[in-house]
Amino acid sequence: MVEKNKILITGGAGFIGSNLCDYFLSKEYEVVCLDNFATGHRKNIEHNLSNPNFKLIEGDIRHYDTCVSALVGIDYVLHQAALGSVPRSIKDPITSNEVNVTGFLNMLQASKEAGVKRFVYAASSSTYGDSEALPKVEDKIGKPLSPYAITKYVNELYAEIFGRTYGIETIGLRYFNVFGRNQDPNGAYAAVIPKFVMQLMKYESPVINGDGNYSRDFTYIDNVIQMNELAMLTQNPEAINTVFNTAYGDRTTLNQLIHCLQSELSNYNAKIAEVKIMYGPNRAGDIPHSLASIEKGKKILGYTPQFSLQEGLKEAVKWYWENLEKEK
């Protein structure tokens, strides 16, 4: 038997992180999850606590010593820990910076010192900022439109410098509107899909920011897992110390999205089709349209996304129906 490598997943109790934990444990890797449970949930990982290949470290990436101790014996880092949300960063830019910049730098420095094989990190489509070009291509970005976007761009700059200066292998994955199982529908900064699903299930009218014609490249979680695995294991030198769009490569307006959600949920409860949709003002810091070019990922990593929006929504709605019904 060839011994599997050991992976540290920061933010491993969060939405994307917990899915990565599940996936790599199913592949018989040893997985260490580092999370402070600021936005992650213990329920996302509790089924793994009895797995001998799984270790939970409750700690904060803002503490350098915590990062150092979490990295003992680690081969690969999948860095997901961050404070997401544009509105949150506008309300509290200092905490967003502490977690997303200082925490990131702590992890990068500690990973360099630990001699990890590769540092794969969650970057963001918010880095494209005010660039109006569509589709979004990795080497053409605009000016950031929020404190959150600034922090994620700074991550890319630090990763590039560390790669160039110290020789650590880094790969950034610019996530575009990821959705799927384990995504929290609660809280002021809940993502749009789980929030809309929860509201529709309660017959509450979802409020769309703007006229509903803003569009996004909604990306199912399993496509993101595939990109993380490809980035972690690729032997292509062109992939190292660069960034990749992580998306499906198609865009959907919020009006189209809500129609799809109502349609899928109506398969479980026909009354949901009658819920009225409301419209409110545009949200500060939001970009009008987002669409990823995924050609670079296809060419260099061999990325082939398996789930379209419709296929992903079918899976996600099924998961939400089964799990939110339990919580009612």
Image (cartoon, grey):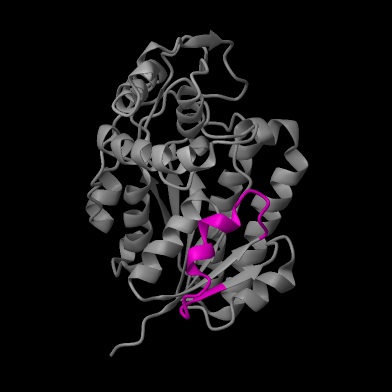
> Which residues fall within the magenta stretch?
36-55
Please give left or right for residue 122 compared with residue 281 in the image. left
Q: Is residue 99 magenta?
A: no
Identity of the residue drawn at 33% across and 35% down: 313
Of residues 155 and 25, the one drawn nearer to the viewer in this rendering: 25
Position of 2 relative to 54 (above/below)? below
The answer to whether residue 80 of the structure is visible from this angle is no
Of residues 146 and 326, the one drawn nearer to the viewer in this rendering: 326
Position of 217 relative to 94 (above/below)? above
Identity of the residue drawn at 68% across and 36% down: 89
The answer to whether residue 260 of the structure is visible from this angle is yes
Per the picture, the main secondary structure of the magenta-coloured stretch is loop
Identity of the residue drawn at 31% across and 61% down: 230
Position of 305 relative to 32 (above/below)? above
Q: Looking at the figure, which quarter contains the N terminus?
A: bottom left
Please give left or right for residue 237 compared with residue 326 in the image. left
Q: Quadrant of residue 271?
A: top left
Please give left or right for residue 149 compared with residue 215 in the image. right
- The percent coordinates of residue 307 (x first, y second) are 26, 42
- The percent coordinates of residue 18 (x first, y second) are 48, 57
Q: Hey, which residue is sitting farthest bottom in the picture?
A: 1
Q: How many marks?
A: 0
Q: Is residue 49 magenta?
A: yes
Q: Quadrant of residue 247?
A: top left
Q: Quadrant of residue 300?
A: bottom left
Of residues 242 and 191, the one drawn nearer to the viewer in this rendering: 191
- The percent coordinates of residue 317 (x first, y second) are 36, 36
Position of 54 relative to 272 (above/below)? below
